[in-house]
Amino acid sequence: MPQIGYLSEDRLRNIPKRQWAAHEFSFYLHDLIAHLTSAAERHRAGHIQIKIETEKDIEALREASDPIDFLSVTGRTDEERRLMVNHICAALLPDMLHFIHAGLTALEKRKFTLAFACLRKPFNEGMPLIALLCADEEKFFTKFKTDPVDFLDGRRFHRTAKRLAIEAAIAKCSDLDFLSADVLYAYLFDFENPSGFAGLFDKAMHLVTRNSSIKTEAYNLNFIFKDPRQNDVYESSYQVISYVLLCIHLMQVELLKRMHFPADDYLKQLSIRAAGTYQALFLKGRSEIAGSINETLGGLMKCPVCNERVRLRKRTVPMFFVTENLECDQCGHVNQFPLAWLMSNHAGDGVNSQHD
């Protein structure tokens, strides 16, 4: 797969060339989550309106330690839950992004131990917590309010519980129906999966490990003697990273919808572009999303150099969806294409339909 053009070659020089597009897509997903987090804050999507109706309310507000305390004291449970959930999302996602950014940057420098140590917290702890919010925010609110330690402690919120939370979130969120809780479990929590991250996360955090699947060998310390010139980590990592980041992004979209974020068509468009890029990079067979774009926007995709109609191919999908650059399949010329604008203007024509 050719370079997408989202990151400079200088940043990619230590990564195997055939993984450049996958690394760029991973960073694109990180930036997409960051962009939506910032946009939600600018639009005050997490804010709620509270009616102060009586002198008693005014007095309670003066005495409350914070708005959430006021809502709790005055029995405004629905508003309290909405504000609490919104507040958690606004704080948790940026924290996750800091670690994800550090992990992806470490991969650019072949610092494998640091990369997996950084990715562990947002993937194994943050993502399942977001899943709990998506699955049942009323239950989450009740448990979080009474005893967050007991609710989220590793002894209760263990690997199986996390899989169930992810499964429930996928069932609840319309845009997650093509994802699989079993796949996410295999990627993040199954020590028997040689292509997963469970073992790598533990090895990155501990010099020695006992689990039979990842037991430290004689005369060895986990990752300490790993040759940074080896490429095996890159070969197996990016599909996992992209799958998890795509899941986080789509869960974020679901939560933003509940906050009445004023851009539902825009959110749908971003989700389709992210899912379409993942499909082109990692899945076998034809890209159905690319086919939908060809059918809906094909009459507008014409090369300004050779004047031939351009068809979106699987290999050109990542560049098209991520950077809005369209490569002519006849002469190879690359030109800008107003994809976001056109998708917005064809929202009802099937272009914003997601395929399995």
Image: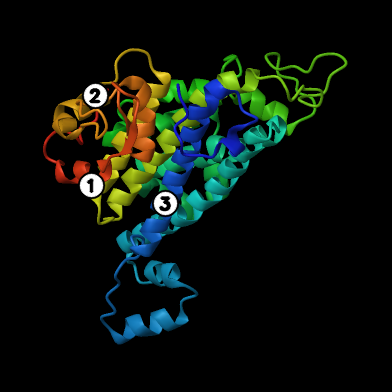
At label 3, which amino acid type do we have? His
Circle nearer the viewer, 3 or 2:
2
Q: Residue 93's x, y, as percent? A: 48, 49
Q: Is residue 141 visible?
A: no
Specify few, some or many for label 1: CA neighbours under 10 Å numbering under 14, 14-19, or 20 or more: few
Q: Is residue 6 visible?
A: yes
Q: CA distance from mark 2 to mark 1?
A: 19 Å
Q: Which residue is mark 1?
A: 341
Q: Which residue is mark 2?
A: 311
Q: CA distance from mark 3 to mark 2?
A: 30 Å
At label 2, which amino acid type do we have? Arg
At label 1, which amino acid type do we have? Trp
Q: Is residue 57 above or below residue 161?
A: below
- Say whether marks 3 and 2 touch (CB < 8 Å): no
Q: Is residue 194 above or below residue 7?
A: above
Q: Which residue is mark 3?
A: 35
In the structure shown, which secondary structural element does the residue marked by tag 2 occupy? loop
